[in-house]
């Protein structure tokens, strides 16, 4: 009966992101292989329903959840051998699972649901509801969705002016317009300066081009170690009218509860912007 139900779950999840899942829900045995699904699963599921989370969530550099909370669960690096030893009822992950792993799990009869990286808040909320449906924790999914909505409402700018902001990662990498962080920038009163320059996801923006045409705000998304010298280059501090603010790179990619933290941080930066709002449209 459980296998028939799991087949129904997979069919439903593949059908246009529908969040309605047939009963009974999975009460135990869920393994997550991705830090984004880890964070959502840990929020909506009972601990007893979680067999393991990805090892990424124990590493502060890659985790999208509280690493102390992640340490309460078993961790897996995602190898087929480790997953099989956990005897999961279901594996959830992102959509970058190696094909060999996907095929091996299928041969072992271990079902897997893959969730792509959310490009918008709406896509992320849909994933929250899907994972909540898998676990049978509908109300927890709705509670998290309400927290996301409340955070975005708090972060909405009062003046309506879009402040040009550059999210600048290690090595000069910038996010494209079709990304979750770009959606969050729009919702919190910023304009994506990288997209305005015609740059796409993971394009490189050299320091020289930033100095020649600086944005109003630089969100430095790096660890500020030696390899991130460009983000802390002294020439940036001499740019008139350009604010710089650190932005945790762990807030860039995952949705779910990460949206709450990202929105709060963006709102904090937006409040710190000192130039009159009337000047932003002229940049």
Image: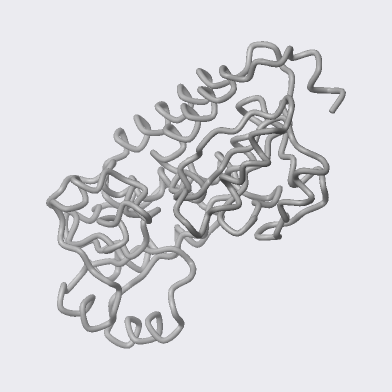
The answer to whether 263 is drawn above or below residue 227 in the figure is above
Quadrant assignment for the N terminus:
bottom left
The answer to whether 58 is drawn above or below residue 133 in the figure is below
Residue 93 falls left or right of residue 227: left
The image quarter containing residue 28 is: bottom left
Q: Position of residue 122 (x, y in %)?
A: 56, 40
Residue 220 falls left or right of residue 208: left
Front residue (pair 156, 83): 156
The answer to whether 146 is drawn above or below residue 140 in the figure is above
The image quarter containing residue 160 is: top right
Q: Position of residue 249 (x, y in %)?
A: 48, 48
The answer to whether 63 is drawn above or below residue 34 in the figure is above
Q: Position of residue 24 (x, y in %)?
A: 24, 53
Quadrant assignment for the C terminus:
top right
Q: Residue at x 33, y 48 (%)?
A: 39
Front residue (pair 146, 17): 146
Q: Position of residue 156 (x, y in %)?
A: 59, 20
Residue 258 falls left or right of residue 154: left
């Amino acid at each position: 009966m459980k296998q028939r139900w799991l087949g129904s779950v997979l069919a439903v999840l593949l059908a246009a992101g529908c969040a309605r899942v047939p009963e009974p829900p999975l009460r135990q045995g869920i393994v997550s292989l991705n830090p984004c699904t880890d964070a959502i699963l840990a929020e909506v599921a009972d601990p007893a329903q979680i067999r393991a989370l990805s090892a990424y969530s124990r590493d502060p550099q890659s985790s999208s959840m509280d690493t102390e909370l992640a340490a309460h669960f078993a961790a897996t690096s995602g190898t087929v051998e480790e997953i099989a030893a956990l005897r999961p009822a279901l594996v959830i992950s992102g959509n970058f699972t190696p094909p060999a792993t996907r095929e091996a799990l299928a041969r072992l009869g271990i079902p897997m649901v893959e969730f792509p990286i959310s490009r918008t808040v709406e896509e992320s909320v849909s994933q929250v509801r899907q994972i909540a449906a898998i676990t049978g924790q509908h109300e927890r999914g709705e509670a998290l969705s309400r927290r996301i909505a409340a955070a975005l409402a708090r972060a909405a700018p009062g003046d309506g002016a879009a402040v040009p902001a550059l999210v600048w990662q290690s090595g000069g990498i910038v996010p494209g317009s079709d990304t979750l962080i770009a959606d969050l920038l729009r919702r919190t009163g910023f304009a994506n300066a990288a997209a305005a320059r015609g740059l796409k996801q993971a394009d490189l923006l050299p320091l020289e081009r930033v100095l020649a045409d600086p944005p109003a705000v630089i969100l430095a998304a790096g660890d500020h170690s030696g390899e991130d010298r460009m983000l802390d280059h002294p020439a940036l501090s001499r740019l008139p009218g350009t604010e710089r603010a650190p932005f945790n790179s762990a807030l860039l990619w995952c949705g779910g509860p990460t949206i709450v933290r990202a929105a709060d941080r963006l709102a904090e930066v937006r409040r710190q912007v000192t130039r009159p709002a009337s000047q932003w449209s002229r940049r």
